[in-house]
Image: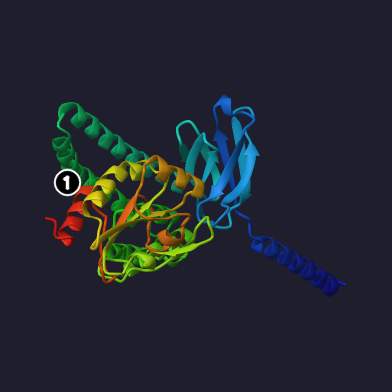
Amino acid sequence: MKIRTIRTLLITVTSLTIIVSCEKKQSVVPEYIVEGIADSTYNGQKIYLVDHNRVGNNKIDSVLIDSNRFVFKGIADTIRYAGVFIEDAAYVPLILDKGRIIVNLKDGIASNTPLNDALTDYNKKTGELYKERENIYTELKNKIKDKDKFKAEFDSIFSKVWTPKYMDLMENTFDANTNNVIGSVVLYEMSMWMRTGQIDTAVAKLSKDIASLEMVKKIVETNDALKKTAEGQKFSDFTIEQPDGTKVSLSDHAGKGKYILVDFWASWCGPCRGLTPEIKELYRKYRGDNFEIVGVAVWDKPEDTERAIAEDKIEWPQIINAQEIPTKIYGITGIPRLILIAPDGTIVARNSTGWKDFKEIVLNKLGKK
């Protein structure tokens, strides 16, 4: 009886040990909670949670704002660059991380986790720099009445003082966050200012997980497109179906014995349409056997493009309804964008600089200066 009792006790203890061990091995599912404070004017409106690394529809969830508050809950399976927004009203970027994230729509701040505090701090510093640039612009505008002198002074301060400070902020923040999502966010901003080789170097610093994010993959794709269509490379062709059913290619114009200035634009783009008079002057003076201009309307509705062509009295040939096709091929992330193609089809210039410098390049190639 004694031996039997001991054996029973051992079995019971062993069973309990197994149960406890099993309980210890059970993993706790990480959860995110995004709690927001909103102005009372937004009560009853829908607010969305979006994932910026998603391709296409990036909406994760939506809720109604009630009593000045909103809450999103979900599984934090991965750490993502995200945001909350009310259509045409408010937006706050955030890092969708495990834990409780507090969002203040009015101040545009997400906080209460280390990554969100770091992102908010970075955004605050960039905001201060942009405010500084705005103040410089206003001060010089009030001080210097001559348009050319004002532009020269502002461009000088912008390139020699402001831009280095902004680049330092981005590079220091990037170097401190190469193993987390903030690194990908800052890299996206940096890529707008960097040359292709610099982007290659920056991407190589990222951890394997961060380098695999869709946001980083897009940066790499754009960078690769820029390399393929850099100065000295042959132009890359594309063919677009027009509203009347005909098809037009860039090769209908480029590589046929003329210098071709390609203007990527859209009807809704103020700077694009502001540049039209300058391009028109160039076209009227120099079009002919050696020079032609071709407009390529991107990211736009065909009817809006056609209306803008009529309103601005644009005279040069147009390829409309191009959407994202040429911008992906040429690594274009913003417009207006100008590319000059030589008579043999070689790309000789892309306007990384302003219109004045680019115009000088065009005139030099045409032998007009």
Asked if 161 appears above or below 243 in the picture, the reply is above
Q: Looking at the picture, which amino acid does disc 1 mark? A: Lys
Q: Where is residue 130 in the image (x, y as percent from the top left)?
A: 30, 38
Q: Where is residue 332 in the image (x, y as percent from the top left)?
A: 37, 57
Residue holding disc 1? 160
Left or right of 234, for residue 179? right
Residue closer to the observer: 231 or 244: 244
Left or right of 200, for residue 97? right
Secondary structure under tag 1 reads: helix
Asked if 316 appears above or below 161 in the picture, the reply is below
Seen at 36% across and 50% down, the residue is 335
Residue closer to the observer: 311 or 305: 311
Residue closer to the observer: 227 or 54: 227
Q: Position of residue 251 (x, y in %)?
A: 37, 68
Q: In which quarter of the image is residue 175?
A: bottom left
Q: In which quarter of the image is residue 288?
A: bottom left
Seen at 19% across and 43% down, the residue is 155
Point out the residue furthest to the left here.
Answer: 369
**Could you tell me if residue 112 is visible in this image?**
no
Q: Where is residue 67 in the image (x, y as percent from the top left)?
A: 63, 27
Neighbourhood count class around disc 1 (C-alpha, 10 Å): few under 14, some 14–19, many 20 upward: few
